[in-house]
Amino acid sequence: MSKKVKQKETRRVTGRRTFLLGSGMLLVTSFLSGRLYQLQVAQNNRYKRLSDRNQFDHRVVPPRRGRLVDREMRLLAGNAESYLLHITPLYAGDVDKALAQLASLIDLNEDVIAQVLEKARKGPSFRPILIRESLTQRELSRLAIRSAYLPGVTFEKSLRRIYPQGALTGHVTGYVSPLTSREIEQDRSLGELPDLATGKIGVEYALEPELRGLPGAERVEVNARGRPIRVFRDFEPESGGDVRLALDIGLQQHVTEILRRGKSDPVDMSAPEVQRAIAGNRELKQHLASGENMLLRDEIGKITPPESGAVVVIDITNGEILSMVSSPTYDPNIFTDRLLTRDWRRLNEHPRNPLLNRVTAGLYAPGSTFKMVVALAALEAGIITEGTRHFCNGSMELGNATFHCWLEDGHGTVNVVSALERSCDVYFYEVALKTGIQRIKDMANRLGLGDVTGIDIPGEKQGIIPNHEWKLATHGVVWTPGETVVASIGQGYVLTTPLQLAVMTARLASGTKAVTPSLRAVAGEPEFAPLNISPVALRIVRKGMFKVMHGSLGTARAHNLPTGLGGMAGKTGTVQVKRITKEQREAGITKNIERPWKERDHALFVGYAPVQNPRYAVAVVVEHGGSGSSMAAPIAKATLQRVLEIRDRA
Amino acid sequence: MATETVSILKTILRIPWHVLFVAGVLVIVGSLALYSASEGSWTPWAGRHAVRGGVGAAMMLVLAFIDFRIMRIWAYPVYLMSVVVLIVLLGIGSGGSVARWITIGSFTFQPSEPTKIAVVLALARYFDSQPLEKMRSILTYLPPLVIIAVPFILIVEQPDLGTALALALGSLTVLFVAGLPWRYILVSIIGLAAAAPVMWSQLYPYQKARVMTFLNPESDKLGAGYQITQSKIALGSGGLFGKGFLMGSQSQLNYLPEKQTDFVFTMIGEEFGLVGNMFILGLYLLLIGGVLAISFRVGSRFAQLTCVGVAMMLFLYVFVNVAMVTGLLPVVGAPLPLISYGGTAMLTVFLGLGVVTSAVVHDRPEQD
């Protein structure tokens, strides 16, 4: 009884208090409503005035992007002033009329006018709409004179990225382009900088944090017609740092030219015969459509596009990359504005993929340029000495397979030096079998093959230097001795980039230092890791490379440097891309040039100069260029000759 | 089998759909406001807000199927768990930096918010099990003070004074409704007034600055007072009917900071005027009134006190936010529940509404 009464009593208290609480909430809410009434109705005029006069427009000021210059401080990537034209419907009044007036002063096409009108209809009237970017000086002065009659039309200065060397350095600089939504997602603070352009590839991407700089902030005071009256800088933007690259533009220009020409001569583009050839050839048309302005006439008189491939030049003493050419290339300037789909399609449909940086991301079998690796591995392991000889009769039997030497009749008796000089395959087959793939792989890795070099270019490829474990992991079957034989002449699974081949050559030539390449100019002598390869072995291999150029039977003896420049050493490589088919042989096609371009051999050459105190290393790959000795060696020679001449002048 | 079907049907019929409906309208209003805040776009806020609202409502319905008696059993363990989480958080945050957030996957989450609900449940559980004849004794009210003080101190230490005060005020309401005698109430108010100067000296400098700015916002127009000044201009220029959807120049031109979170009410005021603001306040009154009305209907004391506690927590959210944007309170960083962008407050509100739903669904009528 008493409990029930108590329960009722407590419930009554709680109910009463809840009611009291609810009333209190109502009271407080009415109080808040009163405050809202005070602000929004009673004082509305005052705040309306404040809102109209809320004259400060806070803006983020994008920083000036750091410049890229070559070793002689010549501009590779800079910033050009560009004027943007905006219209603010609120101040312009009749947007239609304003645009018609503008169209009579400057170049404005129908589509743009339609787009601006659409935006003006949809968006709030106080937001400025972009009409045009990069106004010309003439347009600017016309607008400036009439600006009083163009309410709501404003122009402002901005900076646009330019690449004065264009396609010549496209693969080095890469390019910047407007922010993507993905970048904003990854870094929210970028959302405040709608006009910012960021590096998407090349050095522009790799050095983005250094080049970008820090944005500033400013307040712009505008009058009732939307014209800026005064600007207050709250903080100054901080410009990005300039970067000096090791590249020599003069050399780059020269090397590009000789690589593109190969062994052929440019034709007169206006000759009727050339025009006829173009008209009947889809591939040539595609080349010309994407900006190509040179065509060649090859040995058998056919009109062809310029050669494709890669050339790298490295300073052995400090790793500086003096030139880095990848052909075909592209003009980075087309990416800085909104990229036209037409240009993009042309680059993408181009039969030879100009967007691929062949120096860092082109994978090629190194061919006979790999023989130095095999020789060093065998010499260092004591499997051969300089005196070890083998007889080459043109082929080697292994199990029931026959491995041929490139020279059908064989080289006779050769030792390691003459095998390098004459590029005897059989000698290296025999030596590689005794050395084993693991030792060869170790040596290749120590020379820089099979791993990225880490230069400031994104998307560098690693390549492949195989061994037992690699085969098992990727193919699920064991390594066979036959594969060691194929690998000994740099074919089969072995894949490297031209940059790696240049690094290998620089290390061989240096003899003591594990040279690492650098795209940036290097101050002083960098500390490279020691190479730790037997000096005796290195001396023997370098002797072989010397003989390639100077020996009476050297594969590239026809392309040595003039004696005054100290001579060069090197190694040729010719990589079979596709076997000659039985049908082709029967039809009498055995010469490389007679085969379809895609089936021809790749031509390679690596080398260094001068022979005493080597200073420069070079690697050349000409895609489907034929033989290393006839196509790649002369390009390497011309390149080294130019480097040495430039150095003499400097 | 048949009885089970009947009980599910019964459950569904007993769910306070009107409360869920009002909450749903508030989420939709929130989505539209956020659509405007991002200059007429469903990304990055409006779309996600709507999705979170849907998830919250679903969670509330799931809670409806949990027997309220189970909640009574779990009230203390849940409270202890949230205290442990707060302690762990303090451990992580030590060394100068402030840790208020836990990140689970891509979702960051502020545990001090749902702690409010846990404290309400623990207090309701406590009073539910007290002998009624002891309700006039002061000793009865000491353990609840400890229940409140522990999380309060932990949250103050984070330091998040705003949330701590809201938690304290909301849970003290449970004591008040439970029947705390008036004489103690008077004594504590006098005591608090006397202790105010001491507490002032304990505040962090940034907290003092906030209070000072609030007292004189014009003194620092582009610093801390900027937000209040801009908020008042935006609200005041909205007038009776506002400038129209997507047309709020203060908000759209980015004069108004935090327009997607703490100042969303201001943006609504600029675009829809006093009418829009009153509509929002009306919706909240309906929601809170609905929850209070349920407290009269439910039988058990535990359910009754829980409902009042949840209603008060809701009310405090709204009051603090509106008072802040109209310049009546310092800028403390309080969201407008169900409308502001931010998952934690939304989760807390739906958690509270879910508990209330469970109370009304599973409650036995009062036994005579």
Image: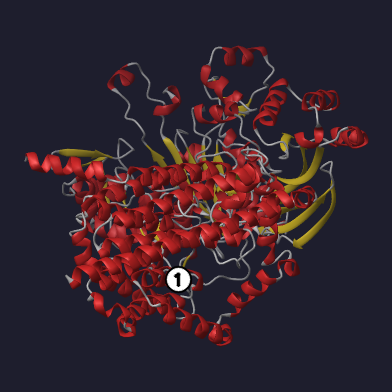
- Looking at the image, which is closer to me, A258 or B227? B227
User: Which chain letter goes with mark 1?
Assistant: B
Q: Position of residue B162 (x, y in %)?
A: 50, 70
Horizontal side of residue A381 vs A38, given as left or right:
left
Q: Quadrant of the N terminus of chain A?
A: bottom left
Looking at the image, which residue sits at the far left?
B1
Q: Residue A255, can we see it? A: no
- Looking at the image, which is closer to me, A259 or B175? B175
Above or below, comparing residue B332 to residue A476 in the picture: below
Q: Quadrant of the C terminus of chain A?
A: bottom right
Going 7% across and 39% down the picture, which residue do you hit? B2
| Total number of numbered discs in the rendering | 1
Above or below, comparing residue B144 to residue A309 in the picture: below
Going 13% across and 40% down the picture, which residue do you hit? B6
To which quarter of the image does residue B206 belong? bottom right
Q: Position of residue B277 (x, y in %)?
A: 58, 48
Above or below, comparing residue B355 to residue B75 in the picture: above
Q: What amino acid is labelled 1 in the image?
A: Leu
Q: Position of residue A89 (x, y in %)?
A: 76, 34
Q: Residue A188, can we see it? A: yes
- Looking at the image, which is closer to me, A212 or B136? B136
Horizontal side of residue A211 vs A415, given as left or right:
right
Going 37% across and 62% down the picture, which residue do you hit? B308
- Looking at the image, which is closer to me, B3 or A485? B3
> Label 1: few (<14), some or many (≥20) within 10 Å?
some
Q: Disc 1 marks which residue?
A: B169
Horizontal side of residue A191 vs B133, given as left or right:
right
Q: Position of residue A103 (x, y in %)?
A: 81, 24
